[in-house]
Image: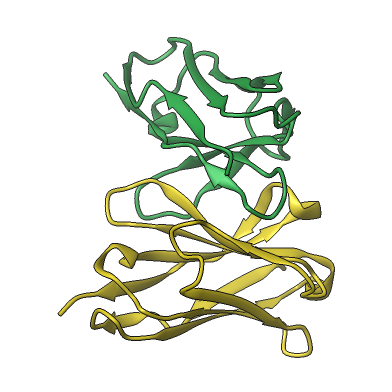
Amino acid sequence: EVQLLESGGGLVQPGESLRLSCTVSGFSFSSYVMGWVRQAPGKGLEWVSGMTGIGNNADYADSVKGRFTISRDNSRNTMYLQMSSLRADDTAIYYCARLFSGSYVDYWGQGTLVAVSS
Amino acid sequence: EVVLTQSPEFQSVTPKEKVTITCRASQNIGNNLHWYQQKPDQSPKLLIKFASQSFSGVPSRFSGSGSGTDFTLTIDSLEVEDAATYYCHQSSGLRQTFGGGTKVEIK
């Protein structure tokens, strides 16, 4: 059974950093493009970042470029999102997503809440 | 960055009515367009992949069409359980984007 489990969310102050993790099971992790999608309270879905299976290429939404860094450790079946210089508008549920052939999201995690507030 | 513009933002519909949601891309994305359904406090669920291909287990009343820049999600004969927010998503490269969403309410 495919499972994606996010962790690392919490309450932080503006300007601080946080690292999210997504640990997966039930499939060959290194064979899949993985991504992060977020959803601010009461708002729509926003693509944050994606990374290729072997970790040689990644890209980011303009809203987080230069502040967030995606990475993965295929030996640990885990993807990360290092978030720095956090702002109030980064407050959201962050979902881990598996992309089939780098295209559609066929599996989602349950999400982890990041709240940025003083 | 490809911008996806969904319309309408909100639709109130009677059961058994037909629902049509459109998604327009700011540039040609071929058929790299997918549709999801999200209910409150749940993760999104895939309905349609590559513009018109139904995902496994999705009821046949959901269908998609279009290519290039203009896409449509159709729900034939809306059921009460279809009350949700629907999103389009483009996967042209690693910098992907979502539409703003369409909330479908049951009258």
Residue B67 position (above or below residue B3)? above
Whether residue A15 can be seen here: yes
Residue A95 position (above or below residue B8)? below
- On screen, residue A82 versus residue A39, left or right, reads right
Residue lying at 55% horizontally and 45% vertically, measured from the top left: B97
Residue A38 appears in which quarter of the rendering?
Answer: bottom left
Residue lying at 51% horizontally and 49% vertically, measured from the top left: B44
- On screen, residue B100 versus residue A37, left or right, reads left
Residue with the most extreme top position? B17
Quarter the N terminus of chain A occupies: bottom right
- On screen, residue A19 versus residue B2, left or right, reads left
Q: Nearer the viewer, residue A45 or A108?
A: A45
x and y percentages locating residue A35 in the rendered image: 62, 63
In the rendering, what colour is chain A? yellow
Q: How is the image coloured?
A: by chain
Residue A115 position (above or below residue B70)? below
Residue B103 position (above or below residue B95)? above
Residue lying at 75% horizontally and 29% vertically, measured from the top left: B31
Residue with the most extreme front position? A66
x and y percentages locating residue A78 in the rendered image: 66, 82
x and y percentages locating residue A111 in the rendered image: 46, 67
Residue B106 appears in which quarter of the rendering?
Answer: top left
Residue with the most extreme left position? A118
Q: Nearer the viewer, residue B13 or A102?
A: A102
- On screen, residue B3 versus residue A16, left or right, reads right
Quarter the C terminus of chain A occupies: bottom left
x and y percentages locating residue B79 in the rendered image: 44, 23
Residue lying at 31% horizontally and 26% vertically, measured from the top left: B105
Q: Nearer the viewer, residue B79 or A3?
A: A3
In the rendering, what colour is chain B? green
Residue B68 appears in which quarter of the rendering?
Answer: top right
* Number of numbered discs on residues: 0
